[in-house]
Amino acid sequence: MSRSARLSLWNAAFVIARRDFTAIVFSKVFLLFLIGPLFFLAISAGGGMIGGMAASGINNPALGIAMSAQDNAAVKQANEALDPLVGMPDILLIEEASRDDPAALLDDEDRNLFAVLTGTLDNPLLTGPKEDVERWEGEIAMMVGAARGEAIPQAGIRTSITDGGIINRQTARDATARAGILVLFMLTMFLAGMILSNLVEEKGNTIIEILAAAIPMDAVFVGKLFAMLGVSLVGLTVWGTAAGAILYFGASALPPIPPPAVGWPMFFALFVTYFSMSYLLIGSVFITIGSMAPTVREVQTISLPATILNLGIFFLAMYALSKPGSPLEVAAAIFPLSSPYMMLARAAQDGVLWWHLAALAWQVLWVAIFVKVGATLFRRTVLKSGGAGRVRDTERKGLLAMLGLAKLGILSNRS
């Protein structure tokens, strides 16, 4: 058998990515890393569910029935008969002497009503906020039909929407967009920090020297970057599954969440995609910074400007969100570092999908640029900082190279 030869850049990068991914994901520290946020999420969800159940048990709003005494009695009887079958709202019979304008009855905090049914059984009028009217209109129509004595209750009900309950759809979507930007920023910054700690640790125990003697440093950069992206996606999957389970089982105790314009499935898919783009861009910057510092303390000092820059990008995206269609909003959607945030916000606000195809192509181009520039700087600086940069002995380098070949197994043998 002949001498070994180095792997190609992408094959070597794959070996590094597989090595880092396996070492991190199957470690006990990573398990604790995953469990930490889950405890916080579980405690928050548990407190919210308990508070929601307590609030629903104490202040369950009712439907006010403000008709004649005979009609009130008929509606009550129909409500009691239908409730075991279809689930009817709680009702509060309002005496004739206490009847007032429906809007005034809704504003009465002592009554705690979500809507008021007035008029007669032949010509009923349901007054209340839009979301409550739409939620209960079918059941109330069935109840009125049963109160009339119809075999198949199908009463037609006039509705009157009160101003206080109308939800501004655009405002609701803006709230979803801002929440998406915030979660994306927090996850990116939280998970990108792992790159720095991993790199500084390997520089401190001479692993970088072994890698440099065995494979191109560009491959080390690319492999580490995509390995940490894979690790981050594992964490995102675990935390997302836990959050989804909490939302599913605790939906009744949580306030309604405004749906994004593209729908929840597409929004989640775009969130993961834009998170990947943002992570690769920020991760390229962070790993390049990590190559310049020999210790954790110096990493924190050097990375501070990059962290402040990313914080500024976050505030830019949040501010541009309040200026739809403005040059600032367009510029924030084009600028590479803020583009993932703004396009995720657009997914919540607008259902146009071709924007995202163009934006992703643009972001992939900038990811390639950032990775290329970052890998070049990484190759030039990583062995010039810390203990690795002070090793000049040829014999030691040869020993490290042999150890690297044997330990990492990244040379291909030819027969």
Image: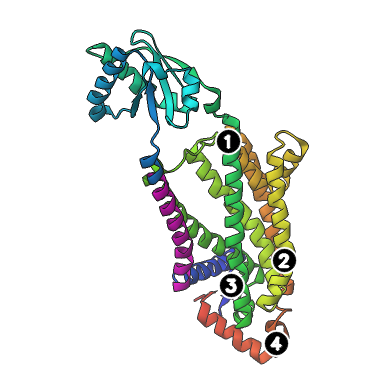
User: Which residue has dot 2 on it?
Assistant: 304
Instruction: From the image, tell me which residue sits under label 4.
Output: 391
Vertical side of 179 occupied by 304: above or below: below
Q: Amino acid at mark 4?
A: Val
Q: Is residue 314 magenta?
A: no
**First in sequence: mark 1 vs mark 3:** 1
Furthest residue toward front: 97
> Which residue, given by chain and number where applicable, does mark 1 sit on?
173
Q: In the rendered structure, are the residues bearing label 3 and label 2 in contact, judged by CB atoms less than 8 Å apart?
A: no
Mark 4 / mark 2, whichever is N-terminal? 2
Task: Say which mark, if any, is on residue 198.
Answer: 3
Q: Residue at x 60, y 72 (%)?
A: 197
| Crowd tier of the residue under label 4, counting other residues whose Cα lies within 10 Å: few below 14, some 14–19, many 20 or above | some
3D distance between C-alphas at marks 3 and 2: 18 Å
Residue drawn 57% across and 46% down? 180
Q: Amino acid at mark 2?
A: Leu
